[in-house]
Amino acid sequence: MRSSLLVATSIFLAGCATAPGTPARGFEELGAGPAFKLGGLTVLVAAPAEVEWACRELGAKPPPGRRVLGCYSAIHQTLVTSENFWILLHEFKHVLEPTWRHE
């Protein structure tokens, strides 16, 4: 159990990028996959390569050498994730606890 938590935490820290910017194109053009509306929040679920592309379109700036596995843009109320449950939970933490930062 502990090793699973450690692996999940490592994935989160390595792959999350908060996205403060403005997308170069409209959300309808992201084409990242199915979009779900949860109240005012848009959740895009996509393949890993599309997640990275969509997050960069939203302005995500990951640390050098790191891939983007998911992101949340508070400005656009948009969360982008793959079908990985742990990444989705991590990004929802950003939504539900706006002051939370990676440790």
Image (tube, rainbow, N blue to C red):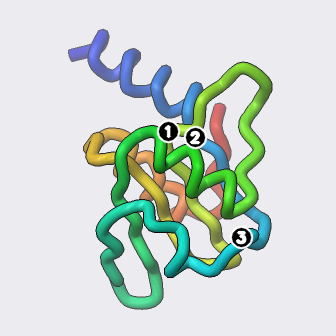
| Nearer the observer, 65 or 11 | 65
The image shows residue 3 at horizontal and vertical percentages of: 30, 10
Label 2, label 3: how many angstroms apart (C-alpha)?
17 Å
> Which label was assigned to residue 18?
none
Q: Which amino acid lies under the numbered mark 3 shown in the image of this protein?
A: Pro
- Element under disc 3: loop
Which residue, as the protein is rendered here, is positioned at the far top?
A: 3
Residue drawn at x 42%, y 39% is 48
> Which label was assigned to residue 16?
2
Q: Work out whether 75 lies above or below 40.
A: above
Which residue, as the protein is rendered here, is positioned at the far left?
A: 1
> Which label was assigned to residue 69?
1
- Element under disc 1: loop
| Nearer the observer, 65 or 1 | 65
Mark 3 closeness class: few <14, some 14–19, many ≥20 residues within 10 Å: some
Q: Which amino acid lies under the numbered mark 2 shown in the image of this protein?
A: Cys
- Element under disc 2: loop
Q: Work out whether 81 lies above or below 98.
A: above
The image shows residue 49 at horizontal and vertical percentages of: 47, 40
Residue drawn at x 53%, y 68% is 30
Provide the residue designation for mark 3: 23
The image shows residue 52 at horizontal and vertical percentages of: 56, 44
Q: Nearer the viewer, mark 2 or mark 3?
A: 3
The image shows residue 6 at horizontal and vertical percentages of: 39, 16
Q: Which amino acid lies under the numbered mark 1 shown in the image of this protein?
A: Leu
2 and 1 marks in contact (CB < 8 Å): yes
